[in-house]
Amino acid sequence: MPSYHAASPNADEFISHAEITDTLRCAQSVKQDTALVDAILEKAREAKGLSHREASVLLACEDPAKVGEIINLAFEIKQQFYGNRIVLFAPLYLSNYCINGCLYCPYHYTSDIPRTKLSQDEIRAETIALQNMGHKRLAREAGEDPVNNPIEYILESLDTIYSVKHKNGAIRRVNVNIAATTVENSRKLRDAGIGTYILFQETYDKAGYEHLHPRGPKSNYAYHTEAMDRAMRGDIDDVGLGVLFGLENYAYEFAGLLMHAEHLEAVFGVGPHTISVPRVKPAHGVDPGSFAGGISDALFEKIAACIRIAVPYTGMIVSTRESKSVRERLLRVGVSQVSGASRTSVGGYGNQSGEEDTRQFEVQDTRSLDEVIRWLIDAGYVPSFCTACYRAGRTGDRFMALCKSKQILNCCHPNALVTLKEYLVDYAAPQTREAGERLIEKEIGVIPRESVREWVRTNLVNIENGQRDFRL
Ligand code: SAM
């Protein structure tokens, strides 16, 4: 039996309920103090981040002029650290077997959703379908079921995904969204070459958490909340946090998320690699309106902006759960990664006929990957398929050092252009290719060093000539 009920006393300390409630109370009491809000904004302009207490004041602030400043500052900070690159990925659902009872998820154990799990051959077929679109980076998803989805299945599936090389395609980075696990399993995942270990907290509010997770291993709040500590003790450098907004009080979640990031930074010397901002969506047997924490699009944008300001170096992810217009708003204020052409059903890429039956939730952005790429290019972003960092050892604090010193323009920007070129040559529709070529030509001028510009130009020519001898 997995040791998922092992005592884990620390969660209550680093996500202290008393500290969060006091933070929210203080934020409410000072939110109209313009001098204080201005002082916090002034500090935020240094782009070194804010504490959960400071950031919670900004989130509580309702003065439209100040909210406008928050949104604009988030945009500026994003430009400073991440520039106009947007990384693309797609989820790959392997299995919807699950023994948990999460009230917001159609995979919960009493659900009558048809259960299914991909064989290794089916994973191969899904991987080819994803490669044929142009994807290079995946987020591997599965329900929690130690019998049907044991760690051995997860590890084998990673090998399978990495082994598929179809035409010019390759999946070069697989991020893993796997349920809270042990240090030992974390190390196995690390050794299997995962990118980021992603696990959404869902909610930091312990009472709410226990209500929403009435059964199964995930019902243990402390074990779930301490999962990132175990992942890092298992030498996984890059971990991804997230809250499922729409369940509980957003201000509580926001403070909890930042306290979690502060905890990881304090204990391991490096904060989360990414923060995801999913919102609960309609799903089989799930009505988002039945939860108390629903938030408007405008508030969602403000939350994303406050996250960007509070943790300037952390990547931020928004999925196809959100519509094109909401994604546009979030991209502007801080999101650095988006999914494209996602299927949230098991086997949804190869065989789309059963898509309705097993999908986890409804996606609102149903565009093809090419449409997403074209949209990003037209909006002035550089779509990036780069996955070089973790293969070049730029993970954990090494990536953070690069990001904090604003050096990623020398590194990520050239790589983004080269991987975009790969996409344009191998997969793009003619008009996307034309728009992309124009963008690349313009963006080469932004790269600071002549030697790097030369490297980009050489590789662009190599790609045109069918040579792929770089490791991006
Ligand atoms: N078994 C893993 C775990 O327990 O974390 C992965 C869970 S699932 C495949 C990935 C995420 O989907 C969950 O963490 C949850 O936040 C999200 N999710 C579940 N139901 C959802 C819904 N109705 N709308 C939006 N997101 C949902």
Image: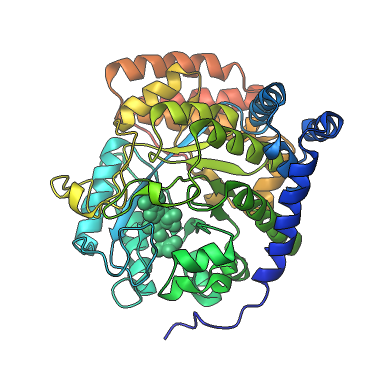
Residue 242 vs residue 151, the one in the foreground: 242
Figure label count: 0
Picture coordinates of residue 207, whole percent (x, y): 56, 66
Q: Quadrant of residue 401?
A: top right
Q: Is residue 138 visible?
A: no
148 versus 236 height, above or below: below
Picture coordinates of residue 337, whole percent (x, y): 49, 38
Residue 419 vs residue 98, the one in the foreground: 98
Of the four image quadrants, the one with ligand 1 is bottom left
Q: Is residue 95 left or right of residue 410?
A: left
Q: Looking at the image, which residue sits at the far bottom?
A: 1
Q: Is residue 456 left or right of residue 19?
A: left
Q: Is residue 254 visible?
A: yes
| Residue lying at 50% horizontally and 59% vertically, measured from the top left | 199
Picture coordinates of residue 399, whole percent (x, y): 65, 47
| Residue lying at 58% horizontally and 72% vertically, measured from the top left | 222
Residue 101 vs residue 416, the one in the foreground: 101
Q: Quadrant of residue 214?
A: bottom left
Picture coordinates of residue 169, whole percent (x, y): 31, 41
